[in-house]
Image: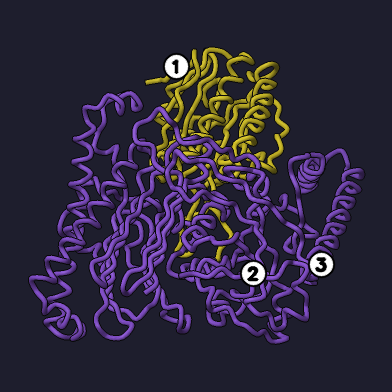
Chain colours: A yellow, B purple
């Protein structure tokens, strides 16, 4: 009689490098707030989705462990430093490994995690990145969506991580708000389609206007 | 058929009288939603019944204890917070990583306390000295919060083939009683979409047929396939068995010989083949249903493209119960495509070996990956053979259900007992077995049984529906599932706290329970057919 219910783990990998300083990082913070308030009104998301935030600058760390939506508290984040996206992927893999429950004889495992990566540049830890990408690809344990923000973001790197890459034109508060609104829409859709296609790839809502899907 | 327990009003359920309650003295207390009898979806005028949720007159010593414990822990937590805050005040400029960790968590705690939407009731497992993480909320705390957020939207009127909000069925066959119900899941109610489940039951003489289907959640017209397949499978089986028993009247005698006899084996083989053929017939019916609608623009309009056969995808679970002629013995043949569960249970004997699952668990890398009737690989003879199960059993109960119920009783191999007990403690089955006298010991136990959990009915938030959960009772009383199953007194006692209105039929009770039991993350359509044999 396990008291576990199946969770939909959602990981946000957020770029907090120096170039995000100022308006962009404030927009990210606002975005997380909006995301939370949106999801907290949705009973399906509340019963299934769990949220974690991993930030990366010159290094990477999980600032919020996988947490129940009702208990989630927006992390303190600030911008500065380089873009250790490779290390962030390693942190992600560690977190998925330790936090996401696997199916056992007596327990249904969690749903396949949903990962959103937001970056405005290219990885500065290219060696680590190269190795991490191979591992992430092999793991196939998550649905990863990467979003390149602004003109300096390099989609070629992101394409190595996942097929699903989005591009947003600017780092403006408006674009950022749209991005987080879309993330919350995606989480809602995923928590709804759980019984429809368990384990499989999930269908996300169409990206907001002005966002381009990178082929 | 099924008598409603009358129970004394709450106040009158005094200690002395409860020692020897007489069923004929008990009086009803209507706390259940008064569902309309009509299962037609157009009839949504469900009357809101009088709600009476007064606390029982009986003193609940156990409940008080729990409250007391909570209070104690709460103060412990407060001390924790104080300690943490004190530590933070003394923090030197260069914090060690551990200390800053503490600070971070402390700030989370403080924030939690400020929040209005969140309740953190600490429990015994609260870590008192090293609060590394925020104490996770219990599932109950979360569902209590979400219960107010689930909306009710009726089935859309502008789509073709709206399906009824509810289906119920009660059949008294020569050798079995079949009670079935199917309810629209919270998810579908929230979004205002159709229920995708269907079920059918039928008989030929003393043989019982059950078919259950769960239309694929991702397909908008899967309900059409679900209904077509159930109707076709059951229809075919009735005719096929009639034909078989008319042409081959020796088959009854053969079945009596037992599985070690060649003739009996041959009879089983022939019958199993009919069951497999019914799956093929079910698929053909889905195909026919598809061709009949393929050119209909109404479907195209909803989908934004033309209808495909995969739009009618669904699971199919078939169970056939054939009395062998030996007393209380039945041959059960089942075939299961996709998820859900078919289980046979002997409720009268001990716990060991009392349960048998008649389906194969899901395959695939990810649990829950399901097959559908429309997938070609599921209909090959080989696949059907491996999905067909035959059992000779003296069990007295058979369940057929969609995953909306089966997933709440995972793993099915051990949790099906809990499904049976949940039916028992909610007064859906086994009422006539209520003991008429209780010992002092049993009375003590009764007082320790937790009150039912009460959630608002999704369809009408003003209606509050009490439901008992075996899980909670087991926890409160420190009993195992086996304990409660073996000595059913606890279950009967617990069922006293659940009261339905007057003349509420068994299938109606099943429906109310299916519609209202709350499990976190469970919002699918629910179908359950209970066959008492």
The label on residue A212 is 1
Image location (x, y in percent) of residue B201: 32, 59
Relative to B498, residue B13 above or below: below
Identify the residue at image location x=88%, y=52%.
B83
Residue that badge 2 annotates? B473
Q: Secondary structure at mark 1?
A: strand
The label on residue B64 is 3
B128 with respect to A206 (left or right): right
For discs 1 and 3, the disc positioned in front in the rendered view = 3
Circle 1/circle 3 CB separation < 8 Å: no
B265 with respect to A215 (left or right): left
Q: How far, Cα to Cα, is label 1 from label 2?
A: 54 Å
- Is A197 or B224 nearer to us in this picture? B224
- Is B179 or B391 nearer to us in this picture? B179
Q: How far, Cα to Cα, is label 2 from label 3?
A: 16 Å
Identify the residue at image location x=75%, y=47%.
B119
Identify the residue at image location x=49%, y=14%.
A209
Mark 3, Cα crowd under 10 Å, few <14 / some 14-19 / many 20+, is: few
Q: How far, Cα to Cα, is label 1 from label 3?
A: 60 Å
Give the quarter of the figure containing the C terminus of chain B. Answer: bottom left
């Amino acid at each position: 009689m396990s008291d576990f219910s199946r969770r939909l783990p959602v990981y946000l990998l957020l770029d907090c490098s120096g170039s995000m300083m100022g308006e962009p990082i404030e927009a990210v913070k606002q975005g997380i707030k909006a995301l939370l308030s949106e999801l907290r009104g949705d009973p399906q998301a509340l019963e299934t989705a769990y949220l974690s935030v991993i930030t990366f600058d010159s290094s990477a760390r999980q600032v919020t462990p996988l947490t129940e939506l009702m208990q989630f508290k927006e992390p303190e984040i600030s911008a500065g430093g380089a873009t250790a996206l490779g290390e962030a992927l390693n942190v992600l893999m560690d977190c998925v490994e330790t936090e996401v429950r696997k199916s056992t004889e007596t327990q249904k495992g969690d749903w396949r995690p949903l990962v959103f990566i937001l970056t405005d540049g290219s990885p500065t830890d290219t060696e680590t990145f190269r190795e991490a990408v191979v591992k992430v690809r092999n793991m196939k344990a998550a649905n990863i969506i990467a979003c390149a923000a602004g003109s300096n973001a390099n989609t070629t790197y992101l394409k190595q991580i996942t097929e699903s890459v989005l591009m947003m034109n600017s780092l403006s508060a408006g674009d950022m708000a749209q991005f987080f609104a879309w993330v919350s829409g995606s989480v809602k859709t995923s928590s709804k389609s759980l019984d429809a296609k368990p384990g499989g790839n999930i269908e996300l809502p169409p990206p907001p206007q002005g966002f381009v899907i990178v082929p | 058929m099924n008598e409603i327990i009358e129970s004394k009003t709450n106040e009158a359920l005094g200690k002395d009288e409860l020692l020897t309650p007489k069923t004929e003295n008990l009086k009803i207390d209507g706390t259940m939603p008064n569902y309309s009898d009509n299962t037609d979806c157009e009839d949504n005028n469900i009357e809101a019944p009088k709600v009476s949720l007064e606390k029982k007159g009986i003193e609940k010593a156990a409940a008080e204890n729990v409250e007391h414990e909570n209070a104690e822990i709460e103060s412990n937590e407060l001390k924790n917070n104080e300690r943490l805050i004190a530590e933070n005040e003394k923090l030197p400029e260069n914090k060690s990583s551990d200390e800053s960790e503490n600070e971070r968590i402390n700030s989370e705690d403080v924030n939690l306390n400020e929040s209005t939407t969140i309740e953190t009731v600490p429990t015994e497992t609260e870590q008192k000295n090293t609060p590394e993480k925020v104490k996770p909320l219990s599932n109950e705390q979360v569902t209590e919060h979400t219960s107010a957020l689930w909306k009710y939207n009726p089935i859309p009127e502008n789509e073709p083939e709206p399906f009824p909000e509810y289906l119920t069925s009660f059949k008294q066959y020569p050798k079995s009683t079949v009670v079935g119900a199917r309810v629209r899941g919270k998810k579908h109610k929230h979004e205002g979409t159709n229920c995708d489940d269907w079920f059918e039951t039928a008989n030929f003489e003393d043989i019982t047929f059950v078919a259950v289907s769960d239309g694929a959640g991702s397909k908008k017209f899967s309900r059409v396939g679900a209904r077509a397949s159930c109707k076709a499978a059951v229809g075919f089986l009735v005719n096929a068995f009639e034909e078989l028993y008319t042409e081959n009247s020796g088959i009854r005698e053969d079945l009596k010989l037992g599985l070690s006899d060649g003739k009996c084996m041959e009879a089983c083989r022939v019958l199993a083949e009919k069951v497999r053929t019914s799956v093929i017939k079910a698929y053909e019916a889905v195909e026919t249903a598809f061709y009949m609608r393929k050119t209909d623009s109404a479907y195209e309009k909803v989908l934004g493209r033309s209808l495909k056969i995969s739009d009618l995808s669904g699971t199919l679970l078939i169970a056939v119960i054939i009395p062998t002629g030996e007393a209380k013995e039945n041959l059960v043949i089942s075939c299961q495509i996709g998820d859900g569960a078919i289980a046979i249970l002997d409720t009268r004997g001990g716990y060991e070996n009392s349960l048998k699952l008649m389906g194969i668990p899901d395959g695939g890398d990810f649990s829950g990956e399901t097959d559908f009737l429309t997938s070609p690989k599921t209909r090959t003879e080989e696949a059907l053979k491996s999905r067909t199960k035959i059992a000779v059993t003296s069990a007295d109960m058979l369940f057929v259900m969609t995953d909306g119920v089966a997933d709440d009783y995972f793993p099915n191999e051990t949790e099906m007992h809990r499904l049976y007990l949940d039916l028992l403690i909610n007064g859906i089955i086994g009422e006539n077995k209520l003991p008429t006298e209780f010992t002092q010991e049993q009375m003590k136990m009764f007082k320790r049984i937790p009150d039912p959990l009460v959630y608002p009915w999704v369809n009408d938030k003003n209606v509050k529906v009490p439901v008992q959960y075996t899980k909670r009772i087991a926890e409160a009383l420190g009993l195992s599932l086996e304990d409660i199953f073996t000595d059913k007194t606890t279950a009967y006692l617990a069922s006293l706290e659940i009261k339905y209105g007057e003349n509420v039929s068994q299938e109606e009770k099943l429906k109310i329970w299916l519609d209202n039991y709350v499990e976190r993350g469970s919002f699918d359509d629910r179908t359950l057919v209970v066959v008492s044999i």
